[in-house]
Amino acid sequence: MNHVIRLRGPWQFEVVDQLDGAPPPRVNSGKQPMPGDWSTELGSEFRGTVAYRRVFHRPTGLEPGQSVWLVIESLVGLAEVSLNQTPLGTIESTGGRFAIESILADDNRLEIVVTHHAHSGPGGLTGLVSLEIQTVRPRPID
């Protein structure tokens, strides 16, 4: 059995770096609805690195034998993902998933740092970000 918790917006964002020669962002920080690219907040021509941050509570009712996955459906750019200052990995446009039950705290800080240097469209988190709770069923004994 699976249960999905969507981590919709608004998310906090902060411009970390701007690509040389790229137009400056409209703002350097703020809140952004998710999912969505950064065109409304930063401008469709902005190129660089943006840190997205979201705080969430530990899901209630977790039981032994359940796994918790952080699922990022899609993005435009390259992203480094961390939870509670623990690096989870790097993902590209097709997104990714990370097992996180061992590092969940009562209050969790998720950070996804997206870098987009391509000249085709704005960057950002374009797909849903969610927690997926799965019940692991024991294998039958033969």
Image (tube, helix red, strand yellow):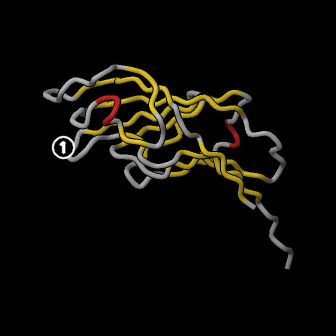
**Residue 86 visible within the image:** no
Is 86 placed above or below 90 here? Answer: above
Write the residue at 53% across / 35% down: 9
Where's the N terminus, which quadrant?
bottom right
In the orientation shown, which residue stands out farthest toward the top? 28
Is 121 placed above or below 104 here? Answer: below
Where's the C terminus, which quadrant?
bottom right
Question: Which residue is at the front of the view, 7 or 92?
Answer: 7
Is 35 placed above or below 17 here? Answer: below
Write the residue at 84% across / 47% down: 63
**Residue 7 visible within the image:** yes
Q: Position of residue 132 (x, y in %)?
A: 65, 51
Q: SS class of the residue under badge 1?
A: loop
Identify the amino acid type marked 1. His
Write the residue at 47% across / 35% down: 33
Q: Is residue 37 left or right of residue 35?
A: left
In the orientation shown, which residue stands out farthest toward the left? 21
Q: Is residue 93 left or right of residue 107?
A: left
Q: Position of residue 93 (x, y in %)?
A: 37, 51
Write the residue at 22% across / 23% down: 24
Q: Position of residue 98 (x, y in %)?
A: 57, 48
In the orientation shown, which residue stands out farthest toward the right? 141
Check disc 1 and report the residue beneath it: 119
Q: Position of residue 62 (x, y in %)?
A: 80, 45
